Image: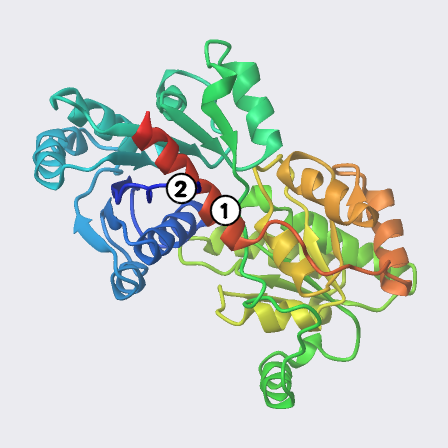
């Protein structure tokens, strides 16, 4: 006699995050919210707002505007408002994705009986200490890579390993289809906008305008290739941001001194990164500090584009598994130019991506919610 398992309970899940602007944590919140709605659950995000709210609500989630992430004493005065909100919503799970919202949620739930289940995600290699420790206090602690799991287990010896789950971020293969090539009209428009990028293999470093992202190393790499007689172009994609004018001036001076002014373009963030990756000969990941994950690596490999990056942190972990030919020791300038020359000459084949898919991340997270809610 067969029996059918009862369906999992429909949940109300509140995600806490500083704002819905841009970035890995925000994108993950949006992706999990979408999966919750699709599964019939109630999805709510509490943040200070931002450009992703419109998409969040269009996909069926609710958004409550409350600044729980600004590093100010005024933020602490909103604990009572957050507690009243949680009492009104009666969530099964509160999921904190950032440190200050984590503390806000922790203190707000202290006044509730019974409190909701508490889940946290560690998205980055945060400085160890009491302030960061809030993200290790969830009933389940999600980390986005094995690198990050090793990091938190080494710095927080009191953390029970059974509470920590590695759920890597994922991408939608349909959004980064294998072998994609942009149409002729897009390419004509792109090269008309940036004529300096035509006529030679394109190296693309996609990263915001901060020093740790390795823009200097990318410029030195281009100059080193030029000295070897290898023509290339460099696109620093997303580096031109408001408030980064001094950093941009510094980069432009290095570009001038290295004699590659006519071969480098610096742009603001763009929405057509898929097409830019697809026309690139190499995608660069040269952060000078280890990062927790490397979403760009899987986006590029999903498109069948080679990646060259430093073998540390989440980027090194992904390259070791998915594209070992693209790994070089951190800050090793000689090895970097040698490997770049090799990959520009003949890049090893890239197989279609079978892991790090968005649906895997969504299903694993929803299964974790079910597990916590049932406990």
Q: Which image quadrant: the C terminus? A: top left
Residue at disc 2, secondary structure: loop
- Residue most extreme to the top: 158
Q: What label does residue 337 carry, if any? A: none
**Residue at the disc numbered 2:** 3
The residue carrying mark 1 is 361
Question: If you read the primary sequence from the N terminus, does the residue marked by circle 1 or circle 2 appear first?
Answer: 2
Q: Residue at x 72, y 69 (%)?
A: 263
Residue plotted at (67% across, 78% down): 181
Residue drawn at the location 76% of the way across and 62% of the way down: 259
CA neighbours of label 2 inside 10 A, class few (<14), some (14 to 19), many (20+): few
Whole-number angstrom distance, CA of label 1 to CA of label 2: 29 Å
Find out whether the residues at labels 1 and 2 contact each other: C-beta distance under 8 Å.
no
Q: How is the image coloured?
A: rainbow
Question: Nearest the camera: 241 or 151?
Answer: 151
Q: Is 293 displayed left or right of 156 in the figure?
A: right
> Residue 360: x percent and y percent?
53, 49
For disc 1, the neighbor class at 10 Å (few under 14, some 14 to 19, many from 20) is many
């Amino acid at each position: 006699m067969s029996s059918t398992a009862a369906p999992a309970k429909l949940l109300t899940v509140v995600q806490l995050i500083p704002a819905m602007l841009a970035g890995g944590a925000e994108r993950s919140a949006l992706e999990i919210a979408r999966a919750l709605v699709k599964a019939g659950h109630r999805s709510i995000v509490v943040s200070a707002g931002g450009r992703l709210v419109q998409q969040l609500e269009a996909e069926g989630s609710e958004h409550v505007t409350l600044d729980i992430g600004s590093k100010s004493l005024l933020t602490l005065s909103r604990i009572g408002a957050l507690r009243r909100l949680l009492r009104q919503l009666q969530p099964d799970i509160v999921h904190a994705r950032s440190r200050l919202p984590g503390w806000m949620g922790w203190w707000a739930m202290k006044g509730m009986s019974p409190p909701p289940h508490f889940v946290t995600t560690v998205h980055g290699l945060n400085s160890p200490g009491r302030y960061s420790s809030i993200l290790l206090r969830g009933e389940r602690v999600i980390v986005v890579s094995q690198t990050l799991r090793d990091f938190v287990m080494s710095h927080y010896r009191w953390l029970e390993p059974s509470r920590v789950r590695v759920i890597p971020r994922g991408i939608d293969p349909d959004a980064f289809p294998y072998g994609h090539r942009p149409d002729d009209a897009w390419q004509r428009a792109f090269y008309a906008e940036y004529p300096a990028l035509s006529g030679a293999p394109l190296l693309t470093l996609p990263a915001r305008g901060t020093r740790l992202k390795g823009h200097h190393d990318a410029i030195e790499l281009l100059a080193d290739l030029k000295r070897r007689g290898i023509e290339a172009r460099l696109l620093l994609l997303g580096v031109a941001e408001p408030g980064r004018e001094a950093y941009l001036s510094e980069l432009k001076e290095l570009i001038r001194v290295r004699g590659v002014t006519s071969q480098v373009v610096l742009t603001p963030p763009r929405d057509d990164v898929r097409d830019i990756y697809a026309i690139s000969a190499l995608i660069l990941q040269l952060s000078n500090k280890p990062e927790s994950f490397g979403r760009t690596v899987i986006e590029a490999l999903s498109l069948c584009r080679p990646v060259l990056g430093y073998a540390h942190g989440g980027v090194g972990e992904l390259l070791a598994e998915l594209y070992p030919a693209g790994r070089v020791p951190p800050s090793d300038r000689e090895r970097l130019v040698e490997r770049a020359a090799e990959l520009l000459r003949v890049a090893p084949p890239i197989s279609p991506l079978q892991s790090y898919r968005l649906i895997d991340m969504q299903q694993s997270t929803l299964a974790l919610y079910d597990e916590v809610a049932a406990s």
